[in-house]
Image (tube, helix red, strand yellow):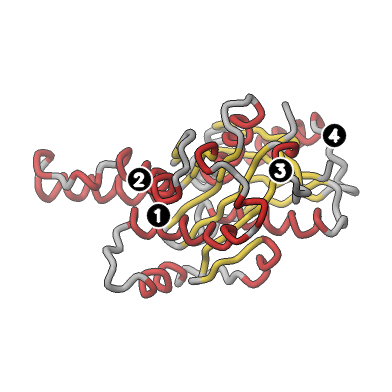
Amino acid sequence: MNKVAVFSLKYYLNNKQLDFTQIDNIEKKASDIEILEKCLEGVNTRLIDRQSMALGAAIRSIENEEFYKKIDKSKISVVVGSLSAAVYPIFDYALSAIENGLNFVNPTFFPNTVANAPASRLCIWNQFKNQVVCLSEGKSSGIDAVMLASEQISEGDSKYAWAGASEENGAALMLLGKEQNLNIKPLAYIKNYESRYVGNLLEEQKESFIKKKLFEWNIDEKKDKIIMSQNSALFSLEPMIDIGKSLIEISQNKIYSFVIISIDNMGILSILELGRS
């Protein structure tokens, strides 16, 4: 695996633009959805609109940074994951079909169309012209989007990528790329990653899989740190917030390596290791 650098991590939560250094100020409350809806009063606030605008707001503050101004925007890919982009439209679709019949279902409820819209809009609004990919596979969607973008960059399919999560209560996006492409010191590097469907494993089976992977990666729990990403009202944003917490300690040279683990009730287990060079 070629080394992929993390250049920036931006959030839009609680009606605020934040970066990883402000992550401790984020309040994790379900009312985030209400705050964002109030901010968008007078605007069509369908799920896809809230997600699209949150994604745009998350990266808007980076436009004033000198290194970002030098990037050829046509070379940027977007890989975004979301739980709500699939779950909500699927239920809306099913309810509409029951109430009105299959021939009269609102087409905007069709899951694949809706799930793809936020990332596609972000590309159109910002003139990103490389690959656009959307994942919707549970709480791990955001962290898996980062893994997929890292793989694309490592294999040379992309030069830079915005990757992360988008829910109707906010967005979190990491800017990834090759270190030699920019004259800027990376915040961290993506060193290892693994994501797979494990199904309904017993707790001890999940723990065994995780321990095996940490052993393969030579993770030292005394020197490195492990975060188990919890379920919350932030859905796939939760692992992205945990990544922000890890970046703080990596940048302050407190921890050499961080491992973020996400296990959701849909049976997807994702592990991502971030670290210094």
Label 1 with label 2: CB-CB less than 8 Å:
yes
Q: Mark 3 points at which residue?
A: 182
Q: Mark 2 points at which residue?
A: 117
Say few, some or many: other residues with alpha carbon within 10 Å of mark 4 (under 14 / 14 to 19 / 20 or more): few
Residue 210 appears in the figure: no
Label 1 with label 3: CB-CB less than 8 Å:
no
Residue 253 image point, x, y percent: 87, 55
- Considering depth in this image, is 218 or 246 the residue closer to the camera? 246
Q: Which residue is drawn at 37% across and 60% down?
A: 50
Residue 82 appears in the figure: yes
Q: Which of marks 2 and 4 is nearer the N terminus?
A: 2
Q: Mark 1 points at which residue?
A: 52
Q: What residue type is labelled 1?
A: Ser
How much space separates mark 2 and mark 4, taking CA atoms?
40 Å
* Badge nearest the viewer, 1 or 3: 3
Say few, some or many: other residues with alpha carbon within 10 Å of mark 2 (under 14 / 14 to 19 / 20 or more): some
Question: Tag 1, which secondary structure?
Answer: helix
* Badge nearest the viewer, 2 or 4: 2
Q: Is residue 258 above or below residue 241?
A: above
> Which labelled disc corresponds to residue 218?
4
**Quadrant into which the C terminus falls:** top right
- Relative to residue 92, is residue 56 drawn left or right? right
Q: Residue at x 69, y 49 (%)?
A: 7
Q: Is residue 177 above or below residue 240?
A: above
- Relative to residue 256, is residue 112 drawn left or right? left
How much space separates mark 1 and mark 2, taking CA atoms?
8 Å
Q: Earlier in the sequence, mark 1 or mark 2?
A: 1
**Quadrant into which the N terminus falls:** top right
